[in-house]
Image (cartoon, helix red, strand yellow):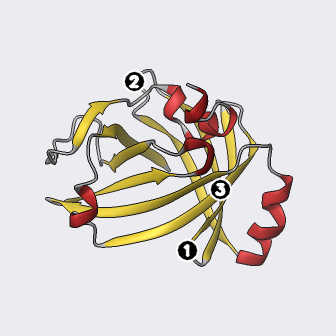
Amino acid sequence: MIEIERKFLVTSENFKKEAQKSTRIVQGFLNTDPERTVRIRIKGDQGFITVKGIGNESGTSRFEWEKPISINDAEQLLPLCVPGMIEKIRYEIQSGRHIIEVDEFFGQNQGLIVAEIELSKENESFLKPDWLGKEVTGDPKYYNAQLSKKPFVLW
């Protein structure tokens, strides 16, 4: 249940030409404490509840527990979330043996595009497409829980 992930800014929309899948996501947070965030998410036609722990020093690894819940449950829990709903479209792009997930944000985070890649170990190498920009792994302002409190339009 340890998630190992690196995050990057995206420099162009060329990733859209390479995407095999795109899914609309709406999510809110019942708790945004960095040591234990609790997220409610609707991803396409599925609901989820997720608990994330504090990251390690580099921000690359952290505890993550996620369970599917019904759409009805997710829809009932979202209004209980703290203000600052996250709206985005997630694109999935195959890059070598990895999947890169690119989130294009809307609403108060319009204009922000962030890519994430999950790895099996922190120092694992991967193919970097030319649209992958500056690495922002471990920078808390790019965490969705923080974007819900201080959205991109306020930077």
* Label at residue 58: 2
Answer with the quarter of the image where residue 61 lies. top left
Q: Earlier in the sequence, mark 2 or mark 3?
A: 3
Residue type, numbered disc 3? Gln
Q: Mark 1 falls on what kind of element? A: loop
Q: Earlier in the sequence, mark 1 or mark 2?
A: 1
* Residue at (22, 65) in percent of width and height: 17
Residue type, numbered disc 1? Gly
Q: CA distance from mark 2 to mark 3?
A: 25 Å
**What x and y, as percent, mark residue 119?**
30, 47
Residue 48 located left or right of residue 14: right
* Residue at (69, 34) in percent of width and height: 149
Answer with the quarter of the image where residue 153 lies. top right
Residue furthest out toward the top: 57
Vertical arrangement, residue 97 with respect to residue 28, above or below = below
Residue 123 located left or right of residue 127: right
Q: Local crowd at mark 3 within 10 Å, few (<14), some, or many (≥20)?
A: many
* Residue at (47, 27) in percent of width and height: 56
**Which dot, 1 or 2, sits closer to the camera?**
1
Q: Mark 2 falls on what kind of element? A: loop
The residue carrying mark 3 is 27
**What x and y, as percent, mark residue 26?**
63, 60
**Which dot, 2 or 3, sits closer to the camera?**
3
The residue carrying mark 1 is 44
Q: Mark 3 falls on what kind of element? A: strand
Residue type, numbered disc 2? Ser
